[in-house]
Image: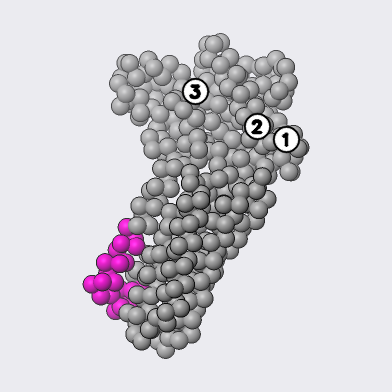
Amino acid sequence: MVDTDLIEIIALCIALDITAYKTYLGISHATTNSELRQFWADMAAEEKEHAAYWNSALRLAEQDSIPQLFDDPVRVRRELQGIKDKIDALLQAGFELQSIPDTFLLACRMEFFMNHHAFETLLQFVNCSDPRQDVDRFYEDHINKFIDAMNRFGASTPSLELLGESLRRSWMENKTLASQNSIDELTGVRNRRGFFSIVNIFGSFAKRNRFTVGILMADIDHFKKINDTYGHAKGDVVLRRVARILQEKIRPSDVLGRYGGEEFIIYMSQIDPLAAYDVAEKLRKAVEADRQDSIGVTVSIGIACGTLPMGSDVEASLAEYISTADACLYEAKNSGRNKVVAARSQPGDVEPRETSSAGAEGTPA
């Protein structure tokens, strides 16, 4: 079912950026200083590009391909509508633009009004769905460029300086808040919510295109013993180290998350079972070979691969794959640890499983 609240939130983001685009373009046309005229034209172009990002997200939301990203979407929608009303009222009041500080004050107030955490939450989602865009960095550069220009063109006054610094600080706080919603603070990889918010979309795309996907469940062996022997602080170091190794060894298109405790989950797109097994073995060996702080660590890994059935619910299908991979992980733990166990057939089937012993080469027969 299409989430109308999410659609309205994204539509409001588009409307706000289009308003900023038109405003900055108007300031550019009215500016006589050639350097300033180009600056405002650049700002307008960036706002237009921001709106293009949201249009892409809107199309996905209208196809019911984006999960609800907000705990209270109704409140977020009302807040954004309130911001739009404030900006519309500000522009309709005929704000006087008689000097350079006047233009920057208008723009600074607009940017401050638009500095809502919804933008950063959506940005992080867009950025994760296509990391090549680095949209989050683009938005941050936009704000920094604006504040730097305000100082460079001599528009800065005590009031504007305070507003500019408040804008920068508010943006960073929103960025931190959005990260906390999707990133595991200890390891720096995606938490469960952040993992599934992006993987559900990748799963929908894979289902439509009949791509084979893989789920890896990796668990640190004897982690309780590590905590008991070296202390929880060292245990945290081990968790961060394993997360780093896993992140470095998977493809940019794969998604890593901390599933809970010492367990990690990896979604692999467009990968066949033999390749998934090879990746799991590479991960297992990389963790075993790393002996930072003289603490030897190994992982056990379970794998499930296949295509998501057409007409099926993506979340339910992925849950089935995770359950199968988790069962394979359980078998790996029970059969000696430091092993990879791969499901032979599709999740939901009754299948024998194939196990690799520690140090085994190649793929299972």
Circles 1 and 2, Cβ within 8 Å, touching? The answer is: yes
Q: Quadrant of residue 292?
A: top left
Does residue 175 appear anywhere in the picture?
yes
Circles 2 and 3, Cβ within 8 Å, touching? The answer is: no
Q: Label 3 crowding class (10 Å Cα cut-off): few <14, some 14-19, many 20+?
A: many
Q: Give the amino acid at mark 1.
A: Ser
Percent of width and height locating residue 163 = 30, 67
| Sequence-earlier tag: 3 or 1 | 3
The residue sitting at 58% across, 22% down in the picture is 326
Q: Residue furthest bottom?
A: 32
- The local secondary structure at tag 1 comes to loop
Could you say which is closer to the camera, residue 291 or residue 25? 25
**Mark number displayed over residue 312:** 1
User: For mark 3, what is the residue?
Assistant: 219
Could you say which is closer to the camera, residue 353 or residue 182? 182
**Mark number displayed over residue 316:** 2
Could you say which is closer to the camera, residue 360 or residue 344? 344
What are the residue bounds of the magenta stretch? 149-169
- The local secondary structure at tag 3 comes to strand
Q: Give the amino acid at mark 2.
A: Ala
Q: Residue furthest top?
A: 335
The residue sitting at 27% across, 69% down in the picture is 161
Percent of width and height locating residue 221 = 46, 18
Q: Is residue 288 above or below residue 92?
A: above
Q: Give the amino acid at mark 3.
A: Asp
Percent of width and height locating residue 19 = 51, 71
